[in-house]
Amino acid sequence: MRRKTTSKTTYTLPIGPIHPAFKEPVMFEFEIDGEKIVDVDVSLGQVHRGIEWAGMQRNPIQILYLAERICGICSFSHPIAFARAVENAANIEVPERAEYLRVIHGELERIASHILWAGVAAHEIGFDSVLYLTWRMREKVLDLTEYLTGNRVTKAMITIGGVRRDITKDNIPKIRETLEYYKKNFEKLRHVFLDDKTIKLRSKNCGILTFEDALKLCAVGPTARASGVKKDVRVDQAYAAYGDLDIKHITPDILTGEINGDVYDRIVVRLLEVKQSIDLIEQCIDKMPSGDIVSEPKIPKLLSAIKKNAGEGIGRHEAPRGEVIHYVKLDGENEKPYTWKARAPTYNNILPWIPMLKGEQIADIPIVAASTDPCISCTNRVLIINKKHRKIMSREQLHRLSVEKTRRLMKTHHIIGGGTI
Amino acid sequence: MEENSRLKPEEIVAYFKEEFKAKVKESRIERRVAGVNKNEYVNIWIKIDKSIFKKAVKHLCSLQFPHLAVVSGNDLGKNIELIYHFSLYYGERLGEISLNLSVEIPKSNPTIETICDIIPGALTTEREKQEMLGVKISGIPDSRRLFLPDDFPEGIYPWRKDETGPQKMVRNLNEVRK
């Protein structure tokens, strides 16, 4: 841990190794002047499980299941990025229908993830009624996922060279019904998050990431796009079926006409992306060609083909939190890959936290940190160190500080009630 | 970025070859198509000599400020290969080009210059490469470990495949103890 000589007026506030927003282990060390954050240091690794090393002892089919367990929410994104890397390294074709099916499952995951995030963000600032509203809405897409794949979270849909389960004609009405539900309720969600005065007070001009910082610190996903950096693998690269679909970058100015790069803008981007995902799934259902869903269904045959190929490849995919990239090197002798490197989007969104959090108040830590939708993996303690006093602060206490700030703001701005449902 | 100032994949390779001549050791353009419309996307792989590494990154930045996705690495026996995965021309519909810049450094002197002064976002991945592959990034602004705990032994690098690898530390749970 970096120990800096703090001046007399400031003190250090370590938060972690848990995340102040999610129950995930990451360690923050804040230098605090009164209520204001002067400097931030992040340390990671509390849940480093050596997955890449473990993967290098396994064959690519086994890695798919390991990759699926890197993250519970992105349980589609990591396997698809890995499969694409292997497909590129070993020159494996993917049938057209499978490309469309990949998009449908990728977008269903995005809807589930963004709505989950919206609930967490509302909880962070003390609107638990909104948390219940959003998570109830999220159930619908999880039900659909279960209907299509057999599971709510770990879907096991991806295989190398295609997908494992088809979507038949009989499944279409259920998909359409779910999409209609979201279309009907989207306006409600938009109104709750974007028109509410208190949410605006807490999120506007809070946790700002400038365009320059987002670019230089290599931010990805909605975090980058909310700052105006147009980076979205789905738009930029013709992978899966995204090249055939009508899709454009989502930046907050589409709705509000301006880009501030604050927490509010990140809410705008995610909400618009939910709408975009609904649209993409509809396009896929309309355009989906018939045919095979996997190029080589016999796994031993597939593995022996991979074994004979020497080469390297990268696979990119736009996960709900941003670009995920996997690198695979095959040596042409072994089934197991010579090298496997997986990079999750939060990895790139760590450094952008620093400019976002600097200058904010302690009570803003939860919402600003949560605004990048970090995915680190769970514990429960906050530690405050003053020169003389050593005080352990629980996650609940930090959360209470955030809620109190909301209530305080509501009082000073004469807002009655919590949320506007 | 304006349409006319964009370079084609071949021109990007030529752009590096003109500047660095024989120091560009290998180059490969990988074209892939996807979907019903068979739209194309491109991965460029360029291998360069260690001596021009920093200059090459600067040269790349004068084309466009690139997005650095991550740095990956291979233990090749005598050498360690670092691959810098950049992407160029993103922000345009189907315009993105992935540029993978690789450089080999000998295990006897595994040092490479930092690029944090050019791309500050490279810090996380450079710190990871130091602890995982045992390379030395000279001039890195923050050389602490990133993922590995402070009590992890010195001189063990999880991604190495030689005697400095983590094999000894791993309990092989699949083996039946006799």
Image (tube, coloured by chain):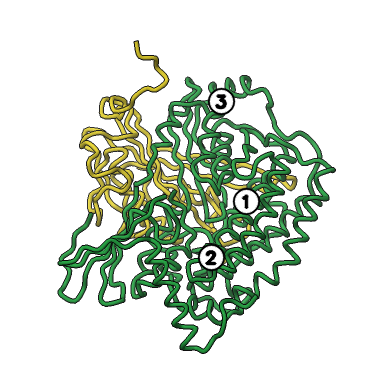
Q: Secondary structure at mark 3?
A: helix
Q: Judging from the image, what is the letter of the chain drawn in yellow?
A: B
Question: Label 2: few (<14), some or many (≥20) within 10 Å?
Answer: many
- Residue type (three-letter) at the residue carrying disc 2: Arg
Q: Earlier in the sequence, mark 3 or mark 2?
A: 2
Residue drawn where x is 28% and y is 25% of the image:
B168
Q: Are marks 1 and 2 on the same chain?
A: yes
Task: Give the residue pinned by disc 3.
Answer: A306
Q: Secondary structure at mark 1?
A: helix
Question: Label 3: few (<14), some or many (≥20) within 10 Å?
Answer: many
State the residue in front, A310 or A105: A105
Q: Is residue A373 above or below residue A158?
A: below
Quadrant of res A38 = bottom left
Q: Are marks 3 and 1 on the same chain?
A: yes
Question: What's the mark number on residue A225?
Answer: 2
Furthest toward the top, the residue is B178
Quadrant of the drawing holding the C terminus of chain B? top left
Residue drawn where x is 43% and y is 38% of the image:
B26
Q: CA distance from mark 3 to mark 1?
A: 29 Å
- Specify whether B123 is left or right of B64: left
Question: What's the mark number on residue A109?
Answer: 1
Q: Secondary structure at mark 2?
A: helix
Camera-nearest label, 3 or 1: 1
